[in-house]
Image: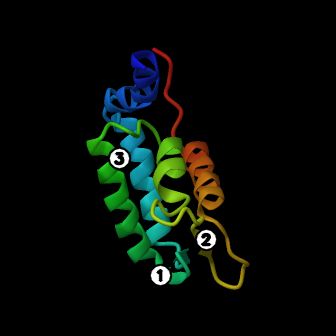
Amino acid sequence: MRPLLLLLLYPLAVVGTAAPLSPAARAEIDALMTRLETSGCEVNRNGTWYPAADARSHLVTKLSYLEERGAVENAEQFIERAASKSSMSGHSYLIKCGVNPPVETGTWLTLQLQGIRASAPVANPP
């Protein structure tokens, strides 16, 4: 019984010991949230469409929750664990920009992250 209990509790211990967000990860997530807020898009959460600014506020709350628990270390984890679906219903979030058809927010944010990284200045070697 004890080995089974340890096996079940191990994932919680791993999540609980995760490092806080690095400055680079924080900057990427902040840039994602800025892109979302200024996109003019709408986000569907559990069947209701919200302005991007409201979606940003909601996602920042979810990020804070994950950070308090050491459960997010980078932008990819943020997208996967907070910004892709409802933690209550399990339904995927959707984003609709202009006349374009809705896409899953995880896909949209991943594309935005790629754009952020592509436009980041390249460090000069010493």
Q: What element carries label 3?
A: helix
**What is the distance, in whole Å, between disc 2 and disc 3 at their CAs?**
21 Å
Q: Identify the image quadrant of the C terminus.
A: top left
Which dot marks residue 50? 1
Amino acid type, label 2: Leu
- Pick out the residue farthest to the right: 101
Q: What residue is disc 2 on?
A: 94
The spot of residue 64 in percent (x, y) is 30, 52
Residue in the image at 52% along x and 83% along y: 49
Of residues 28 and 72, the one drawn nearer to the viewer in this rendering: 72
The spot of residue 124 in percent (x, y) is 50, 24
Quadrant hosting residue 112: bottom right
Q: What residue is disc 3 on?
A: 66
**What is the distance, in whole Å, between disc 1 and disc 2 at their CAs?**
10 Å
Q: Is residue 35 above or below residue 49?
A: above
Residue in the image at 60% along x and 72% along y: 95
